[in-house]
Amino acid sequence: MLAGTGAVGALAAYALVRYPGVLRDPAAPAYLVLLCGTFVLYMGLAGWQIRRPRAGVAFGAFVGLLAGAAWSVEIWAGGPAMLDDRVEGIVGGTFALIAVVLSVAAGVLVGIRERNPRAATRAGLFAGLASGIVVFCFAIVITVTNVGVLSTRADYLRQFASGHSHAPDIPTFLVGDILAAGIAHLLINLALGLVGGGVGALTARARAGQPDAGPASN
């Protein structure tokens, strides 16, 4: 988790150095503050877990990786895959739904299985952290390495030509847009994981007093 968070910081720095025009956007200072704050939060949570490994974290992180992979397919489908509009909508929508379900499910499943509210909360938390890291890293890499392809998409060309962007060229526009989306995912994915962790904690409390199911009597 620490290595992944470090990769988030390194990729963000690379994108800003490679495309400095991103910083011309009036909203750039706010996004930078949000990115730095989120980076510190992720680092703090990952470091806290290394010091005190506890139940629920490993499972949550594993499910988070799966959710991040599903989000990545959704990003790929809406970008360099250059799919037909109908196919793009089906693939993107399907994998976005899978990602949301997985993000929420981690904490719920641990709550049902472990009957431990704290373990359920941790599972949800780390599912969100892991998926946020995967999505941010994949989004930046896939955009930077496919700028030429993405620059030919009619929808991106229309957005750039609308005049709302302060970017000097479309590659800078695309990188700035994906940076903003990546930062949003760091927070959204974490929130989804915590929602699942909260539901899992409530489920665990409700099941805590129930006896384990034994074999049926004859």
Image (cartoon, rainbow, N blue to C red):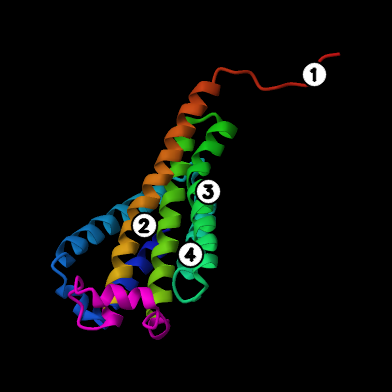
Viewer-proximal residue, 124 or 144?
144
Q: Quadrant of residue 151?
A: bottom left
For marks 2 and 3, give the CA distance. 15 Å
Viewer-proximal residue, 182 or 10?
182
Q: Are marks 2 and 3 in contact (CB under 8 Å)?
A: no
The image shows residue 65, relative to residue 161, as above or below, that is above
The image shows residue 150, relative to residue 39, as above or below, that is below
Residue at 46% in and 31% down:
201
Q: Earlier in the sequence, mark 1 or mark 2?
A: 2
Q: Are marks 4 and 3 in contact (CB under 8 Å)?
A: no
Give the amino acid type for the residue marked by disc 2 in the picture. Answer: His
> For mark 4, what is the residue?
72
Q: Is residue 154 left or right of residue 123?
A: left
> For mark 2, what is the residue?
185
Give the amino acid type for the residue marked by disc 4 in the picture. Answer: Ser
Q: Earlier in the sequence, mark 3 or mark 1?
A: 3
Q: Can residue 71 be seen in this snapshot?
A: yes
Give the amino acid type for the residue marked by disc 1 in the picture. Answer: Ala
For marks 1 and 2, give the CA distance. 47 Å
User: Residue 165: where, in percent of width, then height?
Assistant: 20, 73
Residue at 49% in and 34% down:
200
> For mark 1, what is the residue?
216
User: Looking at the image, is mark 3 or mark 1 nearer the viewer?
Assistant: 3
Q: Earlier in the sequence, mark 1 or mark 4?
A: 4
Give the amino acid type for the residue marked by disc 3 in the picture. Answer: Leu
Q: Earlier in the sequence, mark 4 or mark 3?
A: 4
Label 3's element? Answer: helix
User: Residue 66: where, in percent of width, then height?
Assistant: 54, 56
User: Looking at the image, is mark 1 or mark 4 nearer the viewer?
Assistant: 4
Q: Which residues are magenta?
A: 145-172
